[in-house]
Image (cartoon, helix red, strand yellow):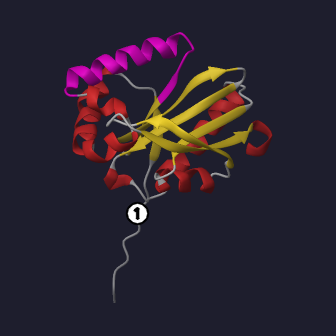
Amino acid sequence: MKSRLLTTLTTHLMTPVVGDAAALFALIDQNRDELARWMPRTASIQSVEDEAAFLLHTLDRIAANQFWLAVIWVGATPVGTIDLHNFKDGHAEVGYWLGHDFQGRGIMPHALGIVEDVAFNQLALNKLELVIATENTRSQAVAQRRGFHQDAVLRDHLLTASGNYDDAIVYSKLQWEAR
């Protein structure tokens, strides 16, 4: 008889601390080529010290209510981040990334669901937006899985690490749609 091993992923979000810098840098460095395509800031993170400086700046922005960021953890392992940025008039954009080894497991839709709850119920936002490169089909699938509405395609909207521009799809979810 075949034995069946059942496992579950315990995923949780936590506010970053500077002590997370080494593990997050290792994850970024391990996934650098893939991440650089969608996240140009990857080029500026070349050391643990760079990631620590980013986290310190992020914590200052969080304290000033200009940014919201959480590290995505699976058990005791950081696997990516998710954030809210560009706050204006009750709206915010969502940004996220996940290490390659953790993609396709339902982690990001779960994390996005938590962020929707924070955005709509704790921060009292009216609208969330995702701005996703047209070639980034994995992120598009996350938006669709979470019930975000495709609003528009913006031509030459996202600056890439190579200095070119990608077209972007704008997805949104309104507070009343999250209930």
The secondary structure type at the circle numbered 1 is: loop
Q: Where in the figure is residue 75, as x and y percent of width and height?
A: 37, 45
Q: Is residue 6 above or below residue 107?
A: below
The residue under label 1 is 7
Left or right placement of residue 82 versus residue 171 in this view: left
Image quarter in which the C terminus is found: top right
Q: Is residue 113 visible?
A: yes
Q: Where in the figure is residue 121, as x and y percent of width and height?
A: 71, 31
Specify few, some or many for label 1: CA neighbours under 10 Å numbering under 14, 14-19, or 20 or more: few
For residue 159, which quarter of the picture? top left
Residue situated furthest right in the rendering = 176
Name the residue rendered at 39%, 14% in the picture.
57
Name the residue rendered at 27%, 26% in the picture.
44
For residue 155, which quarter of the picture? top right
Q: Where in the figure is residue 62, as x and y percent of width and height?
A: 50, 16
* The one of 66 and 86 positioned closer to us in this rendering: 86
Q: Is residue 76 visible?
A: no
Image quarter in which the N terminus is found: bottom left
**Residue stretch rendered in magenta on the structure:** 46-69
Name the residue rendered at 80%, 40% in the picture.
176
Name the residue rendered at 40%, 26% in the picture.
16
Q: How many marks?
A: 1
Q: Where in the figure is residue 65, as x and y percent of width and height?
A: 57, 14
Confirm whether the magenta stretch covers residue 64. Answer: yes
Q: Amino acid at mark 1?
A: Thr
Q: Main secondary structure of the magenta part?
A: helix
Q: Is residue 107 above or below residue 125?
A: below
Left or right placement of residue 7 versus residue 145 in this view: left
* The one of 44 and 146 positioned closer to us in this rendering: 44
Residue situated furthest bottom in the rendering = 1
* The one of 22 and 168 positioned closer to us in this rendering: 168
Confirm whether the magenta stretch covers residue 56. Answer: yes
